[in-house]
Amino acid sequence: MTHITTYNQPILNLSLQQIDELVISLGEKPFRAQQIADWIYARHAASYDEMTNVSKTLREKLAAQAPLTRAQIVEKQVSEDGTRKYLMEYSDGVCVEAVGLPTEDRLTVCMSSQAGCAMGCVFCATGQAGFTRNLFPGEMTEQVRLIAQDFDRRVTNVVVMGQGEAFLNYDAVINALHVINNPRYFNIGARHITISTCGIISGIDRLAQEPEQFTLAVSLHSAVQATRDNLMPGVAQQTLPQLRQALIAYFEKTGRRPSLEYTLIEGKQTSQKEIDALTKFASGLNLHVNLIPVNPAGNSSIMPPSPQEISALKLRLDHAHINATVRTERGADIAAACGQLAQQRKQ
């Protein structure tokens, strides 16, 4: 844990432990930190003035040294299937996207971990836009708060699959998930929280050491090294054998089954060579493969394979005894793929 010594930054930038440190540095009793965190994350106070069980003196100190500034929704699109896509703005003007995916008994939030992304995946609108900055813990939880508020129902699941590479902002992501998982606050079970990565091996190794049972999803997209390097240049230095070994070690350490995200692009991964490589990579691993028809990004020429090709691929994996499903596309009519709404706003 990195300890901060200067607190002249918004309180949503701080982890729960850092809020403790801030309050103690102001000469207050530790229990005051719990009160303040409760107001922020349980009661969703819009300002320190609402914190009626906190002294006016402490509220004034906090307002001066760690202002409470909430995110706001600046644009929302609603799909015919009920999916809602949001553009949210933080106090410094930086915007990120988040998605609410409702079903009859669940509300899943697809949360961003960074503003923009440096990984450069060719099929991703966020990657085309480049990297702006990391998000702080409270900025991530704001996405969950605002979506719950907009739907007027409790969020049951969170997937860190929005903009950014979660493991390049590891500490902030884990600190945000501690709040989201905390029974005092969002009370979302760890097994209902999924962290997605392009395959940052150091992050997979670190996640295996976490006590919470967060779920891991790894973006594979091809098990042929040259194809994967072309699609995902940001992880070209981390080889597929290294990634496979990291997944073996992760399962041995945690007993939790990771999933492989496999975005399907026309003309890229439906050849026999690609399927044989995927089968070889996944065989013997206790994991699940999510086949995801690509959501075309803006004016991109990248398109999904035909339904017939996708069905044939799924059948081949079934015959190889690889556990796989085809993900149902949602929100295509509202540009719900990562980065599309932000890109449209810039145009």
Image (cartoon, rainbow, N blue to C red):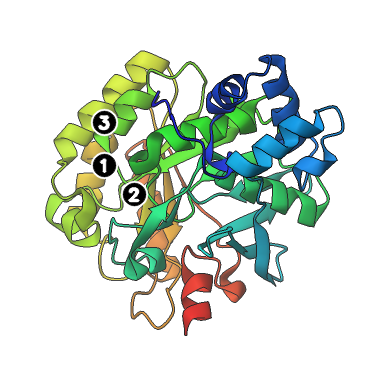
Dot 2 crowding, Cα within 10 Å, few <14, some 14–19, many 20+: some
Q: Mark 2 vs mark 1: which is more N-terminal?
A: 1
User: Which residue lies under the disc numbered 2?
Assistant: 316
Depth check, front residue: 224 or 102? 102
Residue 153's spot in the image, x, y percent?
81, 46
Q: Secondary structure at mark 2?
A: helix
**Image location of residue 203, percent across then percent down:** 32, 32
* Residue 25 drawn at (x, y percent): 56, 22
Q: Position of residue 140 (x, y in %)?
A: 56, 45
Please give the residue where the numbered disc 3 appears in the rendered image: 202
The kind of residue tagged 3 is Ser
Residue 185 in view here: no
**Nearer to us: label 1 or label 3:** 3
Between the residue at mark 1 and the residue at mark 3, the CA separation in whole angstroms equals 25 Å
Residue 135, which numbered label? none
- Identified by mark 1, the residue type is Thr
Judge the density around disc 3: few (<14), some (14-19), many (≥20) Cα neighbours within 10 Å.
few
Quadrant in which residue 40 is drawn: top right
Give the mark, 1 or 3, whose residue is nearer the N terminus: 3
Marks 2 and 1, how far apart at CA: 9 Å
Going by the picture, which residue comes out furthest to the front? 57
Looking at the image, is 210 positioned above or below residue 37?
A: above
The answer to the question of whether label 2 and label 1 lie on touching residues, with beta carbons closer than 8 A, is yes
Front-most of 81 and 72?
A: 72
